[in-house]
Image (spheres, rainbow, N blue to C red):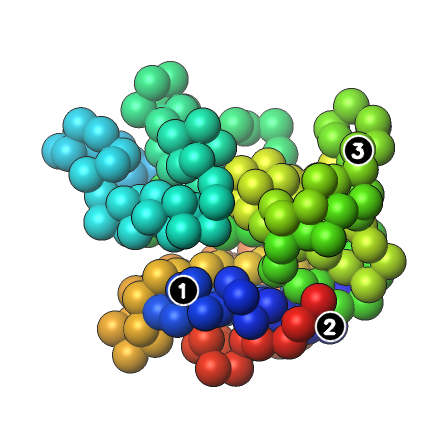
Amino acid sequence: MTSMVNYSKDIVDLLPELHVCCLRIENLHDRVDVTDSVNKNIVFAKQTIDKLQTESAIDSISHWRRAYRKAGIEPTKFRMAAESLLRRLRKQGNLPETLHPLVLICNALSVKHCLPIAVLDTDEINGNLWVSYTKGGERYLDFNGNEILMPSNEVSFIDEKNNAHARKWSHKQSGLSVVRNSTKNAIIIIEALSPLQNNESLPVIEELKSLIDKYWPGSIAECSIRDSNMLISNY
């Protein structure tokens, strides 16, 4: 089970404005109906898309595209998670629905606030996590159950047993730590590219905490917010 999410110095040096919120959730279950809460947030996101017509016109999306380029990732080929969801919402009018209720909530908040929100099963993570460039050879499990050895110099979430839990930063999650209906414990990672004092991530954090308390009372074991000065620990 993971206890800490760290960022390597080279990532933080690239993005000194980065700050991250982590929520550790315990005693999860899937026996809740979150439809109303999810739909309210999706309606808000649709209004944003209808007004701007394109994801690239959203400030936080353009900030993340620049960040991806700095990190060596082509952002329109390997889209940041929130942008991928917004793009689907614009083109198809909906988000994936056959997912764990916590993931449905996080996806809806992600498109509302246009920020990447990762949700991982902590029982499938060995020790701490690092957001870092890969060294090469880390193991990534795709959604078909195939194990892929990672190339070097790709940003991923890497645990202490050399498991890579994402491709191209937040572009695609690993099948190993995806939250399933049987998941009991999870970590939620919200990343924002603005100085912490600008409060970009605070509204989504408060909304998320409120919804978790509504559907899973007492399940928030820990909530931390750290700016770039507090994130560094080399992989």
Residue shown at the point (45%, 28%) measured from the top left: 77
Question: Residue 161: where, in percent of width, then height?
Answer: 86, 58
Determine whether label 2 and label 1 are within 8 Å by CB. no
* Residue nearest the observer in this picture, 132 or 188: 132
Q: How crowded is mark 2: few (under 14 residues within 10 Å), some or many (20 or more)?
A: few
For badge 3, the amino acid type reads Ile
40 or 115, nearer to the observer: 115
Q: Which residue does the image show at 29% across and 39% down from the upper left?
A: 45
The residue identified by callout 1 is: 15
* Element type where label 2 sits in the image: loop
- Could you say whether the residue bearing mark 3 is in a helix, strand or loop? strand
**Between marks 2 and 1 in the image, the one whose residue lies nearer the viewer:** 1
- Residue on which the image places disc 2: 3
Give how far apart the Cα atoms at labels 1 and 3 are: 28 Å
Across and down, in percent, residue 30 comes to 69, 44
Q: In this view, does 38 lie to the left or right of 52?
A: right
Q: In this view, does 59 lie to the left or right of 179?
A: left
Q: Position of residue 226 (x, y in %)?
A: 48, 77
Q: Crowding near pointer 1: few (<14 within 10 Å), some, many (20+)?
A: some
Q: Earlier in the sequence, mark 2 or mark 1?
A: 2
In what element is the residue under mark 1? Answer: loop
How far across and how far down the image is residue 18, in percent? 41, 67
Residue appearing at x 35%, y 61% in the figure:
193
Disc on the earlier residue, 1 or 3: 1
User: In the visual, does 8 lie left or right of 58?
Assistant: right
Residue 37's disc number? none
Residue density around tag 3, few if under 14, some if 14–19, many if 20 or more, within 10 Å? few
Q: Can residue 84 be seen in this view?
A: no
Q: How far apart are marks 2 and 3 (CA)?
A: 25 Å
Query: Which residue is under mark 3?
Result: 148
Q: Which quarter shows the C terminus?
A: bottom right
Which amino acid does the dot numbered 2 rest on?
Ser
